Image (cartoon, helix red, strand yellow):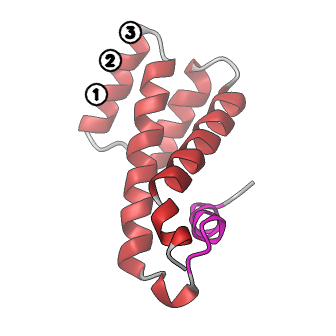
Amino acid sequence: MHTPDTYIQGLFDSIGLPDELITEDRKAEVAEALYQYMFTRIALSLDDESRDTFTTMLEEEATEEELIEFAQDNIPNYQDTIDYVLDSFAEKFKENNNTIKDSR
């Protein structure tokens, strides 16, 4: 299992971004995009009632652990869903960053 840091580093590695271009700001931007994408996809995987609860939890700034626990309890095949979301995000990241790889 990847930590967010190793996952994000893997994204940068996948497009061939040199270490000197991987700033803390760039990592933070990708992390924010990842969390937004992940939470949106999780919400879409929930039934209406659970989605409303999840959205309220986001608005009330529930902890990451609380959000994950809720999703695990309410999404059948949670790990498969998360694996799909991470793979999908990685593909979109690569597509949106081909210019970096191609310009090297």
Q: Which residues are magenta?
A: 3-17
Where on the picture, by quarter, is residue 84? top right
Q: Is residue 23 above or below residue 3?
A: below
Name the element at disc 1.
Answer: helix
CB under 8 Å between discs 1 and 2: yes
CB under 8 Å between discs 3 and 2: yes
Q: Is residue 82 above or below residue 64?
A: above
Type of amino acid under label 1: Thr
Viewed as shown, does residue 28 lie left or right of 83?
Answer: left
Where on the picture, by quarter, is residue 13? bottom right
Of label 3 and label 1, which has the lower sequence position? 3
Label for residue 49?
Answer: 3
**Res 63 seen here:** no
Residue marked by disc 1: 56
Q: Residue at x 38, y 44 (%)?
A: 36
The residue sitting at the left extreme is: 59
Expressed as whole percent of the image width and height from the top left, the position of residue 12 reads 57, 69
Q: Residue at x 49, y 29 (%)?
A: 42
